[in-house]
Image: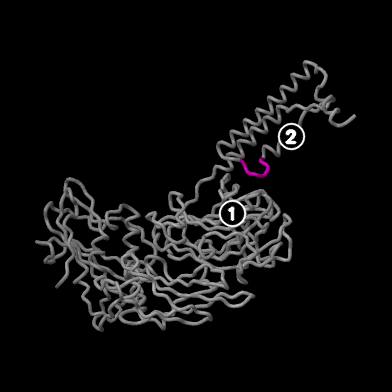
């Protein structure tokens, strides 16, 4: 008798006994109950694509066997299914990541995931990723649950590359695994931006089944704002912008591609039977210049082949590491050869891309900015075919002299043969190489004179203060232009620390700033300034915001009266003594403003004061 006929007889081609039919219905009902339990889990937070604890228990838990081959689920199994379901759901309800220092544990040398967060899910054709599980899940390369794994210094199993970035690196992170099944993995870090440029090193091992690029295994990097919105290709104000990180000449993601000159074909066949392409360790950077002081999340993502048959993984190391020196070209400012003010030049050292097939080319472009806006079209170099230095004459066309200076960004467009590579940058748009506006390059050089460095623009000083109070006319002048609490203090210190960074550019002996703020009552907008009502002295050293009250001047102010604030800035060296920066501009002339106090309008009729 065929196996089909045996199965039909066993399943009841003849009338079943009533007790057997009842038992079969009971098994069906209990199986449906287990499915319902599992579906409840899936609705609250979908289970992993690998076997869940419930599924493992269904295999391991005892069942009642019967002489006719039938089985029924025991009450013990039902209890364990329910307990495992609750435990699996609870284990996945993890707290969201909390902001930490931007560069903390960026090299993973602590052999821990401190400050990092993981999740995994699946990728559909077209690249749509569905995230299912939160939390770090580690394991061997051949384990389907190995989504984020700390690795020591070894050689990858399928590509002749180190699993850490450099000879001095003992640990890195592998994202992904060698198991197919259209999986996706992510490693994230949430932090308050304190550095405009965030370097990192990565290496890739991807199977190459030869599909369309949208199906191929790939690696991507994203930047999310505090609301979880992807701003990789958006400004903080949601306007379009070039990607914040380039993994190719145009994109923040790269797919397996044997024709890419920076992918090599491994001599070892992949874990799922396809050829393997790999990219050795490469350093690149993320542009966060317009997000200073904001909370963001940087996310590294790996995706398997979306068709489900092939896998890929990435290694990450040296997040916030040193300046990149990459085989696909570099560009750096040569400060010694460059001017910092007046008619002059900006000089850049560069290397062209290099592969086994030969050298590439690059073309540099200089874009200027004032007050956050691009000024005219960029100035470009000729195509450069060998490592060297190129100097731009400082552009003046279209610049507003009243702003005192400008910011700049240089882009290196690299190419191998006909293949465009990821561009490299010096500076971040729109604030250039120094935080703050219009301070990368001064249009006029200062004259030798006193110890007073160039002042903050009076309108900038004025914008640093906010105003709050009550109907009783007792008001507090606060940091941060009307912001409240810790955010206002951070904004206040960020502005002055940006000013300090600008001073260090042209006056390297400056270590910190001492600023005395005076509050005056005066008779008219513009002064005069006589005896101060209150004085507050702060020191800015480029570091973290000190703890303390957000109040700056806690002073009763009378409705309709005119008040003024004066800021006297003194640059200090490491020894605490004033530093002569060679400037003859009068700090007192620009660093003052006045306003008419009003209960309703608060700081109404604000006016900067210029003159003695």
Question: Residue 206, position in %: x, y?
Answer: 65, 59
In the rendered view, tell whether residue 164 sits above or below residue 22. below
The magenta stretch spans which residues? 47-52
For the point 57% across and 60% down, which residue is it?
A: 254
For the residues bearing labels 1 and 2, Cβ distance under 8 angstroms: no
Q: Is residue 117 left or right of residue 6?
A: left
For the point 46% across and 79% down, which residue is it?
A: 382
Question: Residue 194, position in %: x, y?
Answer: 42, 62
Name, please, the residue furthest toward the front: 418
Location of the N terminus by quadrant is top right
Residue 567 vs residue 506, the one in the foreground: 506
Q: Is residue 285 visible?
A: yes
Rendered image quadrant of residue 301: bottom right
Location of the C terminus by quadrant is bottom left
Question: Residue 463, position in %: x, y?
Answer: 25, 60
In the rendered view, tell whether residue 19 sits above or below residue 258. above
Tag 2 residue: 61
**Which mark is nearer the camera, 1 or 2?**
1
Element class at badge 1: loop
Predominant SS of the magenta segment: loop
Q: Is residue 39 magenta-colored? A: no
Q: Is residue 169 visible?
A: no
Q: Tell me which numbered mark, 1 or 2, is placed earlier along the sequence.
A: 2
Rendered image quadrant of residue 407: bottom left
Tag 1 residue: 214
Name, please, the residue furthest toward the right: 1
Element class at badge 2: loop
For the point 58% across and 78% down, which residue is it?
A: 359
Question: Residue 216, position in %: x, y?
Answer: 62, 55
Pointer 2 local density, CA inside 10 Å: few below 14, some 14–19, many at least 20: some
- The alpha-carbon separation of the residues under discs 1 and 2 comes to 42 Å
Name, please, the residue furthest toward the left: 523
């Amino acid at each position: 008798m065929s196996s089909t006929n045996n199965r039909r007889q066993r399943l009841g081609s003849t009338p079943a006994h009533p007790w057997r039919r009842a038992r079969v219905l009971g098994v069906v009902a209990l199986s449906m109950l287990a499915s319902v339990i599992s579906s409840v889990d899936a609705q609250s937070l979908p289970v992993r694509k690998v076997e869940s604890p419930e599924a493992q228990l269904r295999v391991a838990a005892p069942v009642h066997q019967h002489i006719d081959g039938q089985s029924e689920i025991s009450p013990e199994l039902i209890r364990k299914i329910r307990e495992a379901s609750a435990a699996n759901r609870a284990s996945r309800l993890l707290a969201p990541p909390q902001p930490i220092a931007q560069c903390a544990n960026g090299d993973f040398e602590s052999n821990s995931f401190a400050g990092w967060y993981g999740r995994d899910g699946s990728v559909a054709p077209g690249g749509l990723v569905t995230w299912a599980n939160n939390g770090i899940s580690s394991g061997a390369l051949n384990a389907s649950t190995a989504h984020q794994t700390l690795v020591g210094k070894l050689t990858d199993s399928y590509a002749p590359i180190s699993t850490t970035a450099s000879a001095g690196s003992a640990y890195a992170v592998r994202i992904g695994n060698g198991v197919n099944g259209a999986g996706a993995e992510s490693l994230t870090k949430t932090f308050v931006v304190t550095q405009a440029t965030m370097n990192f090193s990565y290496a890739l091992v991807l199977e190459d089944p030869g599909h369309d690029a949208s199906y191929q295994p790939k690696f991507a990097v994203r930047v999310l704002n505090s609301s979880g919105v992807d701003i990789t290709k958006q400004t903080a104000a949601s306007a379009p912008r070039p990607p914040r990180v380039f993994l190719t000449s145009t994109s923040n993601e790269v797919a397996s591609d044997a024709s890419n000159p920076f992918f090599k074909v491994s001599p070892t066949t992949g874990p799922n039977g396809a050829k393997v392409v790999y990219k050795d360790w490469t350093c690149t950077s993320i542009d966060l210049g317009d997000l200073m002081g904001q909370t963001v999340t940087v996310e590294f993502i790996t995706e398997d082949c979306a068709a489900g048959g092939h896998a890929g993984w990435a290694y990450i190391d040296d997040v916030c590491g040193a300046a990149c020196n990459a085989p696909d070209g570099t560009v750096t400012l040569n400060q010694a050869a460059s001017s910092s003010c007046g008619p002059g030049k900006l000089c850049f050292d560069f290397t062209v891309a290099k592969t086994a097939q030969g050298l590439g080319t690059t073309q540099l472009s200089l874009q200027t900015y004032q007050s956050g806006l691009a000024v005219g079209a960029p100035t470009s170099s000729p195509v450069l075919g060998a490592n060297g230095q190129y100097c731009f004459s400082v552009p003046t066309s279209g610049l507003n002299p009243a702003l005192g200076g400008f910011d700049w960004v240089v882009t290196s467009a690299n190419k191998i043969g006909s293949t465009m590579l990821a561009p490299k940058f010096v500076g971040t748009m729109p604030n250039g190489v120094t935080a703050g506006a219009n301070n990368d390059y001064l249009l006029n050089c200062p004259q030798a004179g006193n110890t007073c460095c160039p002042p903050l623009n009076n309108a900038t000083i004025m914008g640093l203060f906010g105003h709050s109070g009550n109907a009783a006319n007792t008001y507090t002048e606060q940091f941060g232009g009307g912001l409240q609490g810790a955010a206002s203090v951070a904004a206040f210190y960020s502005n002055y620390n940006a000013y300090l960074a600008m001073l260090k550019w042209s006056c390297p002996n400056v270590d910190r700033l001492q600023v005395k703020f005076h509050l005056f009552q005066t008779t008219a907008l513009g002064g005069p300034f006589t005896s101060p009502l209150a004085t507050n002295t702060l020191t800015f050293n480029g570091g973290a915001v000190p703890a303390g009250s957000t109040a700056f001047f806690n002073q009763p102010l009378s409705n309709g009266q005119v008040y003024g604030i004066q800021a006297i800035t003194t640059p200090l060296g490491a020894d605490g003594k004033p530093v002569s920066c060679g400037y003859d501009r009068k700090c007192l002339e620009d660093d003052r403003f006045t306003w008419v106090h009003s209960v309703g309008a608060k700081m109404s009729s604000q006016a900067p004061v210029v003159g003695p």
